[in-house]
Image: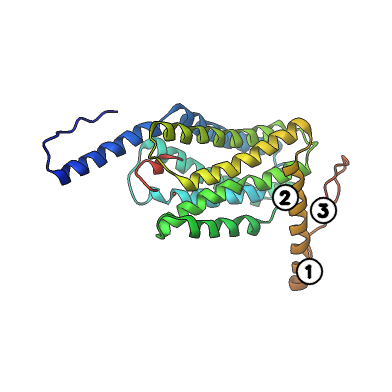
Amino acid sequence: MVVDLPTTLPFAELQDAEAVKQVVKMTSYSWNIFRYVGDYLHLFGIFVLLATLAKNKGTTGISRSTQIMYFLVFITRYLDLLDHNQAAYLVFFKVTYIFTSVLVLFFFATEKGYRSYERQKDTCSLAVLLCPSIIAALLLTDDHSALEMLWTFSQFAEAVAMVPQYIFCYRDRYAKDWGVILYVMCLGGYRVFYAANWIYKKVMLPGYSDIQSWIGGVIEICFFVDYLISRLSGYSLLRALVLKVDEKIHDISSAVELKVLGTARPKITEDAEGSELRQRRKSGMDCMDV
């Protein structure tokens, strides 16, 4: 989109006009094919998740911890719905993400969801994911306002939101629920296309920068690539490391709970298949990424 500006304006007004022109230019590049594909992959993945829950009539194969993480990501990132008007496209996606995350968590709280929830495979500690995300948000935010820090938190929280689901899948490596597999592939693929969207904007606009989103995206894609390697070859170094760290954290958490509460978490045991497992906005354009 090109905006023609008069060149006879006073210097200060000309500067403001150039700034507006730059924002319009950046905004136009934000709407690109990579971003659209990423958005619709994300949306499709959520509907796959809902369809899988309905088909299974339970929460089999799904990590509740991942769903809690995504709920926190959505409600901290999309507070901008309250402070300014946005395109109907953005409002639709943001409201849909929040509503469906609440719906999924509600299903986990129902009798069928509770009974079918495989907590012995959903072992990733939320504290281990949330604490680094909070620290990173405090250190790397561009502005220490509440909205900006929450937006930054959401970027780092999303980077690790799928980790509990990956760990769940690693512990359930012989399961062949294609609904769960398709859901994981859509959520990972969505972030790959968003990375392509960032690269496109950087090429077209060298001054564009979004460090928090880039860091979070790289971390998330690394975990997704590891999942793909694990699915294709049956082994990856990151997979083994993630499980070893997760098991150690589980053991420490169990010991603490035993001392404080008098009860411990169930021990992670090998599954029946014989696996090795022991059971936010620097410019007007940035808010446009959902």
> Label 3 belongs to which residue?
268
Q: Amino acid at mark 1?
A: Leu
Q: Is residue 118 visible?
A: no
Q: Residue 188, image x and y in percent? A: 60, 36
CA neighbours of label 2 inside 10 A, class few (<14), some (14 to 19), many (20+): many
Q: Which sits in the foreground, 179 or 249?
A: 249
Q: Amino acid at mark 3?
A: Ile
Question: Which callout, 1 or 2, points at the residue further toward the start of the chain?
Answer: 2
> Label 1 belongs to which residue?
258
Question: Which callout, 3 or 1, points at the residue further toward the start of the chain?
Answer: 1
Q: For residue 143, which quarter of the picture? A: bottom left
Q: Residue 189, image x and y in percent? A: 59, 33
Q: How is the image coloured?
A: rainbow
* Distance CA(mark 3)–CA(mark 1): 16 Å
Residue at 77% x, 72% y: name it: 259
Helix, strand or loop for disc 1: helix
Does residue 254 lie above or below 140 as drawn?
Answer: below
Does residue 131 lie above or below 227 as drawn?
Answer: below
Q: Which sits in the foreground, 249 or 76?
A: 249
Q: Residue 138, image x and y in percent? A: 49, 60
Residue 122's tag is 2
Q: Is residue 61 visible?
A: yes
